[in-house]
Amino acid sequence: MDKLPLGLALDLRKVVPYETGSWRTLMPVNIMQTPPCNHGCPAGNDIRGFLRTLAEKKDYEEAWHVLTRTNPLPATCGRVCPHPCEDGCNRRDFDSPVAINSAERAVGDYGLEENLEHKKLIAARKEKVAVVGSGPAGLSCAFHLAKRGFQVKIFEAYGEPGGMMRYGIPSYRLPNYILRQELENIMKLGIELECNIKVGVNIPMDQLVQHYDAVFMGIGAQRGLSIDVPGQDARNVFTGVEFLREVNSGKYVDLGKDVVVIGGGNTAMDSARVAKRLGANVSVVYRRTRVEMPAITAEIDEAMEERIMFRYHTNPVKIIQDDDRVVGIMCVQMELKEPDASGRARPVPIAGSESVIPADTVILATGQAVEYDGIEVHKIDNKWISANENLMTSIDGVFAGGDAVLGLETVSAAIGQGTRAASAVEDYIDGSVESRLASPPVIYSKDLNTYYYQKTRRFEKEALPIHMRLKHFKELYPALDPEAIIDEAERCFSCGLCYNCGNCFMYCPDNAVKISEKTGLYEFDLDFCKGCGLCAKECPCHYIQMTLEK
Amino acid sequence: MREQSKYLEGVDKKDLFASGHRACGGCGQALAARLVADAAGENTIACVATGCLEVFSAPYPDPSWRIPFLHSLFENAAAVASGVDAAYKALKKGPVNIIAQGGDGSTADIGFQSISGMFERGHNVLYVCYDNEAYMNTGVQRSSFTPYGARTSTTPTGNTTRKKNMPMLAADHGIPYVATATVDDFRDLQLKIRKALTIEGPKYIHILAPCPLGWGHPGDLTVEICRLAKDTGLFPIYEIIDGKVTNVRKIPVKVPVAEYLKPQGRFKHLFKRGVPSEEVDAIQEIANQNIERFNL
């Protein structure tokens, strides 16, 4: 319109608005911070990522792909992980943490039901990598290397792959078919698998080092350590690892009526609960108390529910035999003194307090170590392999990870190590140095504006009733309701990442928060932002922060 | 483009009150004016009294209003709006949303007679009062909305009178709709604006709009202060429809008034070395009376 209306000297539509951005001393910025769940996950999973995908898109398939970017075994971890992520969850200080573990299991199960396949990142490369051991560490390393195009071959000493997940974890916690499906899915990436080959026995280490560009040792801690008790050479004395391996291989184990399990770790709990399911009366003998038990708390609770007897402050001194069979175990009472090097109270025997517990079978779940047969690498002590920060051992091009390096740890920790080792192997082969970006700072409850969240009830998975548990090895927790899991994912605070609540957009008195044409995300119009900080204050998840002007 | 956030369903954002205005950072009134304009929509005429809003939003040639805007004098926003309504009726045009807007001074003191007249004559006008509890535009002088105990430049030792209860005065004119709102709950505010505009006759909405400069709090606390005003009981949220108080917002967790007073510079003199004075108890008493009266 060329002609202006009567009385107007200036076309107001052509006036450039006054840019109030010059008033600003502080400017708002979007800072993506690390949520405590991601920070606490030993496998390095993007937990916030997959929960938000579930909550916003209700898309299990995409959530599965987010999760399997780091973790090749979500259905397994969703069952066996002691979920340190939930311990950190900022929702803990508000009502109760998000049931991340259950959500992971639901996503993993969806992937198996729908036969979702892992995606390869790049085309095939010619370099070959040998992975020794198909436990979580070896699988995770093989998985990440295969995704990056390497030719990977796994050598497994036992008849079936899976390592401790196959032979150590009882099937009421992790059904065999779940593990097998997840393994098959990983193998589809083009990983070669050879079972019943024990490196160091069937083929020498040197051969691997010569024929492959790199070797990863994820050999775990397969040797059960027994404590020094006279009479442990009797029949029906097992180590925990041995016992679980026998049962998980489908062999018949004659337990008798009374079983005594010695130890307070996860292997002890598993052994005790397996023995209970085989029909024995089980008692667990531990020289400290429940507080000091290294086992996962939920496992101890469940064992107690299943009427497994716990004897604390008790230490075996002698296994009593009749012929070559166990008939009982002599124990002594302990008292706890000042803490030892591990920080736990040091048990000291009380003189003259010996007693005998009748036993037909004794299971010594008192520690594990690496089985070194024919493997010559530098060791920390007799138990663990020594590796540098890139997980390389004393031999050039040989990497190690998992329980063999960490000591006894969880499946997720081993997966995390496998992931790290895969990056280290790639860098070693490419001759480059990994530039690790420091992850952004962790966000804590005090940073959040929880006014905008509502208190809701946490999803609780329901176990089988006790009378139904002990007759068989069926899974303890039946399948989860996918709808309930989506509701649970919506409880996620999305700490440190925008979840599109729109507070900044609505509250800015200067309309300086716009929806970007390109990305569709909220962005700041710094021409008009006066830097009042209202958006940062009212941002529920602390994604907006005020910084000094650039 | 990203879908509209599910958290913003039922909320309008049209930027009919655009960027580039000269309000202070964190201004509650600028925020409220935008929420009101966006809720009312394009078919709206704004008649604004003299005050901060008019001064910061309408300098020639760069007004922030993207709807027709009319400013005359300090005292006659309601009278001008009445005239607009009468003109529309005479020309048989419309319907159009006519919103008269003013600060607390032009509502309760200087412009009270024209508002009272507009209510009494029954014009189809919505009057929105942006309550920032003093004459902020001219340098924080006391108005009849200044609460008990607040320091202004004309009450340096704290105001000694109580705040005029304007929503009740408006309701006693017998008008069909009166409501109170704050800028922190934009959904509630826009809902009340839209609801009011569907009702024929004079309407009155009272919006608490914190003034970071005059109240002496950082600009980023504007929303938080509103929330505290509601949760202490000092600013009850309710509607009065045909003379009956309804839809009272229940306080989820009652907060002592000291929480509300402490972040604000205008109440700083009530806390000598952090110890609350007698006035704080008196303010708590006002809050308690509100809680009892409206059953908050």
Image (cartoon, coloured by chain):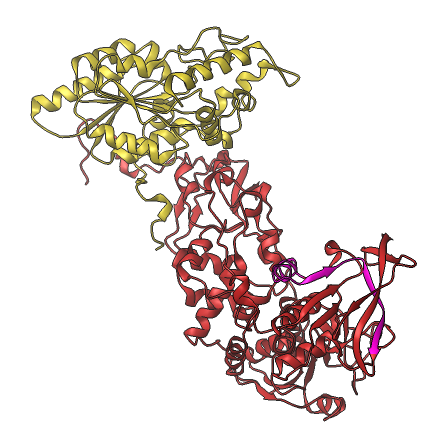
Chain colours: A red, B yellow
- Of the 4 image quadrants, the one containing the N terminus of chain A is top left
Is A535 magenta? The answer is no
- Of the 4 image quadrants, the one containing the C terminus of chain A is top right
Q: Residue at x 55, y 8 (%)?
A: B157
Pick the front one: B155 or A446 = A446
The correct choice, above or below, for A96 with respect to A100 in the image is above
Can residue B74 be seen?
A: no
| Residue B113, x across and y down, in percent | 26, 8
Is A314 magenta? The answer is yes
Can residue A428 be seen?
A: yes
* Residue segment shown in magenta: A296-321
Quarter-of-image position of residue A7: top left
Quarter-of-image position of residue A528: top left
Q: Residue at x 17, y 28 (%)?
A: A6
Quarter-of-image position of residue B272: top right
| Residue A156, x across and y down, in percent | 65, 85
Pick the front one: B1 or B268 = B268
Pick the front one: A452 or A484 = A484
Q: Residue at x 67, y 76 (%)?
A: A244
The correct choice, above or below, for A201 with respect to A312 in the image is below
